[in-house]
Amino acid sequence: MKERKLAVYLLVVLAVSIVALYWFGHEHFEEVPVDMRFCMSPGQSVRMRITENVDLKEEGYMGTIIRCESRLDCTMKCLEVEQDGVMRVQQKWDSGAIKGVGPKGRFEYDSLLHPGMGPLEARRLAKLVGNSIEARIKPSGEILELWDGEVIAGAMMSEKGVRKSNIGVEVYELLRTEIVAGVWQSREHLFDAVLRSYPESEVAVSEQWTTLGQAFATRSGLEEIIFTYKGINEGCACFDLICSVSAGSDMLESLASPAMNVESRLEGTGVGIAEMDVQTGLFTKVQVNMDWVIMGKSQLFGLADMKKSKKITGSSVATLEMLPSNW
């Protein structure tokens, strides 16, 4: 009799344990539709951190390796809300850091510790810190206007070594105008890091939609992201992501080294997850794992090594997360 009671007791404990493991080991979603419209109040601000780990290698036994870790802290603030719900929003780059190893050895830069330009690998990041851009954005996430894109364009041109002195003032200004237009269409301005072009109506569980955009301001090509809505978890709408990028040569690399006939092709595929605050319509967490292939001539491994075509493969992990207001 005692043995039978013990066996029943053990079976009950086992059943409870299995249920507990399943419950605490899996995400649980409230399967309700979600309204994804962007909505901030005047004066409201959020802080965010974007980090990226990149690992690239040139094909071959003695291929050059690039490993890089970067961090960028930003503030997004709503300046004004118009009668039709269109918001004027400011994006400011507060601080940044980068470290890694490349063709010229190790490099490291942190704007909080050493304000200024830093090493060549940090030139673009250093030019952004302390600056800001503004945009008028519809509740659907569509950007109607973008101001001060010249800040980003100037940082890109400086990173690639494109200056007025080596291409002429007229060409320089035309190029900057073209890059500013590319910045608007691409993800470079970071508004699209926390915003996307959302469906106009509520999204149901398991519903999918696709966003298309220019992946880079200086490369022609497309970025495609397929979203699948999973449900609500702890006040956030959760999504699975499938990403792909296909882009051509970098116009800045071509201008920086016109004699080398720089041509390249960049392809990327990956998956990720995203969480969106249902109150503001802002993504509070995004993580994307990508695999990359770059074919052709590239400035990645230095100007001196751009004379021959090569294959570069690698991966990256990019993460965005909202920071507490008192961070």
Image (spheres, rainbow, N blue to C red):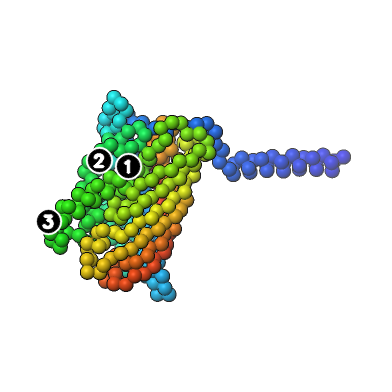
Residue at image mark 3: 169
Q: Residue at x 20, y 60 (%)?
A: 162
Residue type (three-letter) at the residue carrying disc 2? Leu
* Residue 146: image tag: 2
Q: Is residue 277 above or below residue 112?
A: above
Residue type (three-letter) at the residue carrying disc 3? Val
**Disc 1 and disc 3 in contact, CB within 8 angstroms:** no
Q: Earlier in the sequence, mark 1 or mark 3?
A: 3
Q: Which element type, helix, strand or loop, lies under badge 2?
A: strand
Q: Could you say where residue 261 lies in the image, as x and y percent from the top left?
A: 26, 67
Q: Left of 290 or right of it: where is 162?
A: left
Q: Is residue 115 visible?
A: no
Tally of numbered tags: 3
Q: Residue at x 38, y 39 (%)?
A: 197
- Density class for disc 1 (Cα within 10 Å; few <14, some 14-19, many ≥20) is many
Residue type (three-letter) at the residue carrying disc 1? Phe
* Residue 231: image tag: none
From the viewer's side, name the closer residue of 271 and 29: 271
Q: Residue at x 41, y 70 (%)?
A: 59
Q: Which element type, helix, strand or loop, lies under badge 1?
A: helix
Q: Quadrant of the C terminus?
A: top left
Hey, which quadrant is residue 21 in on the image?
A: top right
Q: Earlier in the sequence, mark 2 or mark 1?
A: 2
User: How much space separates mark 1 and mark 3, taking CA atoms?
Assistant: 30 Å
Q: Earlier in the sequence, mark 3 or mark 2?
A: 2
Residue at image mark 1: 191
